[in-house]
Amino acid sequence: MNNKNMVINAFIDSVLHLIALRAYLKKLFHEGYTINGTVSITKIAVINKTFSDEDLDSLSKYGLKIVIKENKKNTLLKKYFIIYLNLVYYCLCHIFIKKNDNISFLLILPSQFFINISEIIQIYRKYGNHFKIVLLEEGVGSYIRNAIRWLSRGFEKTKYIKHKIILLRKEMRYFIKYKFLIRALEKSNKIENFYILENSKSGFIPNKIVCKYFYEVFKELASKMDINSDLYNNVVLINTQPFFEEMDSNQDIDCYKNIAEICRYLNIKLVLKPHPREKNLERYSNINLVIDRSNNSIAQEIILAKAKEKPLAIVGFFSTTLVTSKIFFDIPAISLGNLIDVSKLSFYGNDIKNFMTVFKNVVSSPKTFDELRTTLKNQYL
């Protein structure tokens, strides 16, 4: 990218997206770019207070304006007309979208699913081929799920035929979009993946450049927060996930009880950090562990960036924090996927299996509790 004046249009919908965007902006700033543009967030994110005022203010120093993303509703006739136009545009993309290293506009999105043909056409009309799409790190979903998998998740969760039909239509639209638009964009080098991991012959490995900027953001955020990180010193830390509660399954509870017994035998303190979306923490009341209630709204990576001493190990199922803890802080990460019956977890069971395969170079997956005990014992000693 030779042009040092960069216009940005970004969309974020989670705290991880925000951290990834800040990391990318740091990269641009370090490379000498002057930045201006907008960052869109949804009304739901505003209502749920997903981002604090400090979070959003942190983007203003880069010259970015925060706007609320509006969802426009189209009539049925207009929808079919748009589909017809899109099919024409998809074909034209292969003709007109070409590689160009002199970039002056960046469209920054959480995933391929958010690439909109109408928006691409508007960008092309204004900037020609001087644009690029940047896909932000979105956690494990960036590696184990594509847009079809995300839609399949909704298909399995909904009980209503009407909703299933809507999701099926979305799957078909995405398939057409991928076949035509996204392939044309990839072929023309118009998509940049700003992911902490990159694929290699031996599997996924850390992307050192991306990790560098992520780590800088973690340290910067940690320095500005009042965080109780002492609770994590030399402990086994459990990272929970809310789908067990959603599915009314106790497989995780049984697993944690076994881990508590192992930790008692090894004289290691066991701490549990609940997922922010969990509501019923009483599920863990009969397990011999300490629940971290003080840092529940703070990203674990920020807490670990603040901690003087780190956990001995972090355990979970397919949480993003298992991967980031190992990559950024060299804390042994352990998936418990082999210690439960994933066949009873539907969509999430497939995610757990994919996770253990995809991240085998980063996260260990013991096959028995005896193997887990040996792993933790080696860490403790």
Image (spheres, helix red, strand yellow):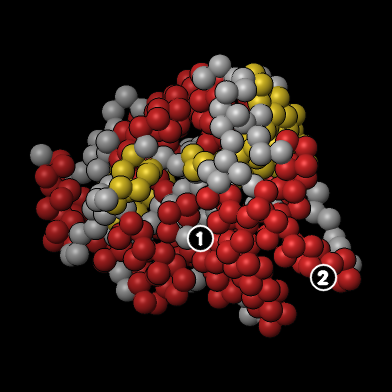
* Residue 158, image x, y percentages: 62, 75
Where residue 6 sits, quadrant-wise, is top right
Q: Residues within 10 Å of mark 1 (few under 14, many from 20)?
A: some
* Residue 125, image x, y percentages: 78, 42
Vertical side of 138 occupied by 216: above or below: above
* Image point (51%, 30%), residue name: 23
- Residue carrying label 2: 80
* Residue 366, image x, y percentages: 20, 59
Q: Nearer the viewer, mark 2 or mark 1?
A: 2
Q: Earlier in the sequence, mark 2 or mark 1?
A: 2
Vertical side of 51 occupied by 153: above or below: below
Task: Give whichever of 285, 361 is nearer the camera.
Answer: 361
- As helix, strand or loop, the secondary structure at mark 1 comes to loop
Q: Amino acid at mark 2?
A: Tyr
From the image, which quarter does the N terminus lie in? top right
- Residue carrying label 1: 146
CA distance separating discs 2 and 1: 25 Å
Q: Amino acid at mark 1?
A: Asn
* Residue 77, image x, y percentages: 89, 71
Task: Give whichever of 363, 83 is nearer the camera.
Answer: 83
